[in-house]
Image: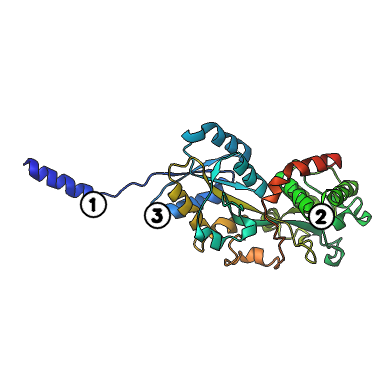
């Protein structure tokens, strides 16, 4: 009888499904953007992706405080500046992945492979189509010209996206020229800097200003809701370095208990199955150049990207903040 029970028990165990452990993802990317991805990955692999959401700063401090006791396996955040900071804080481990190196261009990933960009957003020029013709636009530096006095709108300088733009400008053209441009931007402002890109874009549409600088995905979200808004995108510096781009990206946490699983998840996010799922909801561009963007994004037109490594946004962040402060950009 005991032998029969043992045989039955072994048989039951042999056919019972193996429950995979959770893969824990700390993310500053909005929950509604990542939730469909987590569900798709669970459906594909059986692995439950547990999302822990907060802003980048608090999540990095959380990882630092938890140390080797952290449950987190993957860290996802926006902007090369934040990803660079996470690396400097020792929160990520290098990823040795031929798949990721094949899928993600060198300028969109950490030179030492601690993180990889997964989506791309351009921070470029937007204009009121009733007041400005595209032929009048050219570069970020041109917005410092007196012809734009009282016509320019910007987001506040304490935002990481503007810090990254200015940090990249410093890398491309040096401190002195960048300082002159930023100071003239301030002189040309039509209104005090806005708290967010959406408010700035709405101000352009309302005629409070004629031009401004913002991220393309904010424009995509806004124009989806207000298709008749007289605002259009212009890709800056096409005759020069190209338009400034940044990323949202991911890395494996330094103390992940499941680094191989974490790496596989990031590899999956970089491939054909997941790239559009990762970017399309937010009107972003795929980081993988083999993947076509959503038609709503593609219709804005192709453009040349500045191919400087996005990690420069982080390494020059302190310089950028100090430069903007000295220029009176608040």
- Residue 265, placed above or below residue 5: below
Marking on residue 45: 3
Q: Residue at x 84, y 53 (%)?
A: 207
Q: Is residue 226 left or right of residue 240?
A: left
- Residue at x 63% of width, y 48% of height: 78
Q: Which circle marks residue 173 in the picture?
A: 2
Q: Position of residue 95 (x, y in %)?
A: 52, 51
The quarter holding residue 142 reads bottom right
Q: Image height check: is 263 above or below 28?
A: below
Mark 3 burial class by Cα count in 10 Å: few <14, some 14-19, many 20+: few
Q: Quadrant of the C terminus?
A: top right
Horizontal arrangement in the rendering, residue 230 relative to residue 315 (left or right)? right
Of labels 2 and 1, earlier in sequence is 1
- Taking depth in this image into account, of 164 and 43 the one nearest to the observer is 164
Tell whether 2 sits left or right of 284: left
- In the rendered image, the vertical position of residue 53 relative to residue 15, given as above or below: above
Residue assigned mark 1:
15
């Amino acid at each position: 009888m005991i032998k029969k029970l043992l045989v039955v028990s072994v048989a039951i165990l042999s056919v019972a499904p193996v429950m995979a452990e959770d893969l824990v993802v700390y993310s500053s990317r909005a929950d509604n953007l990542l939730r469909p991805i987590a569900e798709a990955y669970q459906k594909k692999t059986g692995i439950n992706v547990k999302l822990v959401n907060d802003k980048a700063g608090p999540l990095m401090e959380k990882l630092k405080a938890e140390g080797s006791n952290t449950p987190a396996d993957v860290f996802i955040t926006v902007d090369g500046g934040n990803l660079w900071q996470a690396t400097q804080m020792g929160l990520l481990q290098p990823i040795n992945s031929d798949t990721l190196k094949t899928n993600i261009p060198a300028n969109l990933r950490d030179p030492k492979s601690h993180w990889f960009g997964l989506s791309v957003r351009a921070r470029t020029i937007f204009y009121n189509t009733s007041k400005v013709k595209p032929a009048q636009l050219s570069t970020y530096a041109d917005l410092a010209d007196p012809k734009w006095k009282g016509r320019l709108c910007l987001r506040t300088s304490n935002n990481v996206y503007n810090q990254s733009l200015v940090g990249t400008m410093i890398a491309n053209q040096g401190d002195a020229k960048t300082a002159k441009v930023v100071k003239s931007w301030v002189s040309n402002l039509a209104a005090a800097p806005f708290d967010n890109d959406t408010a700035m874009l709405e101000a352009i549409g309302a005629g409070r200003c004629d031009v401004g600088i913002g991220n393309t995905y904010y424009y995509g979200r806004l124009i989806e809701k207000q298709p008749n808004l007289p605002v259009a995108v212009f890709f800056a510096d096409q005759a020069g370095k190209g338009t400034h781009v940044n990323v949202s990206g991911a890395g494996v946490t330094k103390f992940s208990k499941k680094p191989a699983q974490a790496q596989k998840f990031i590899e999956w996010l970089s491939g054909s199955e997941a790239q559009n799922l990762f970017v399309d909801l937010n009107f972003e561009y795929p980081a993988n150049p083999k993947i076509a963007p959503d038609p709503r994004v593609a219709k804005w037109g192709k453009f040349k990207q500045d191919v400087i490594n996005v990690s420069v946004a982080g390494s020059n962040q302190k310089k950028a903040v100090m430069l903007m402060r000295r220029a009176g950009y608040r």
